[in-house]
Image (spheres, helix red, strand yellow):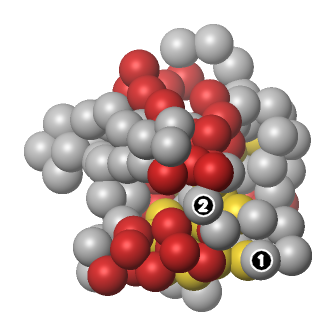
Amino acid sequence: MAKRKSNSSYFNIDDLTTWTKYRKKLCDTCHATCCTLPVEVTVSDLVRMELVDEFEAQENGKVIAKRLQKARIVSHYSHKSDTYTLARMSNDDCLYLDSKTRRCTIYAKRPETCRNHPKIGPKPNYCPYKPR
């Protein structure tokens, strides 16, 4: 559990009590810390992200997972919930986070998990805000 400096205080991404209450425009000055959290996606997200086509979406989830794991896009598949966990880079950033701008490179096609953050998640309506 690494502590990361935020303003003059410390927060711990794993300690939900250190998260910030979400408010409009908070993302404008954030370092995209939420984009270091694991992201679970469904097959419909994968279709939106153009990683799976409509025909392949009818396949068994394990078949899709195997292909995407080989391509290093997915790190895990849960057959019970039929969800995939997107792989992350070695620094825990999402594969789709631009390292320079700290912005999503697939924003218009992003998964539902990302679209609904921080309304849903580990601590609804709070986020692991870290100023730029």
| Residue 11: percent from left, percent from top | 61, 63
Residue located at (51% from left, 67% from top): 64
Q: Write the residue at 37% across / 38% down.
A: 50
Residue type, numbered disc 2:
Glu
Name the residue: 38% across, 58% down. Answer: 94
Residue at 54 percent across and 23 percent down: it is: 26
Does the image show residue 34?
Answer: no
Disc 1 target residue = 79
Earlier along the polypeptide chain: callout 2 or callout 1? 2
Q: CA distance from mark 2 to mark 1?
A: 13 Å
Do the residues bearing badges 2 and 1 touch, measured as CB atoms within 8 Å? Answer: no
Dot 2 falls on a residue whose secondary structure is: loop
Pinpoint residue 111: horizontal percent, then vertical percent: 56, 39
Q: Nearer the viewer's eye, disc 2 or disc 1?
A: 2
Residue with the most extreme bottom position: 1
Q: Is residue 119 visible?
A: yes
| Residue type at the position of mark 1 | His
Q: Position of residue 128 (x, y in %)?
A: 61, 51
Residue 59's disc is 2
- Left or right placement of residue 120 versus residue 29 in this view: right
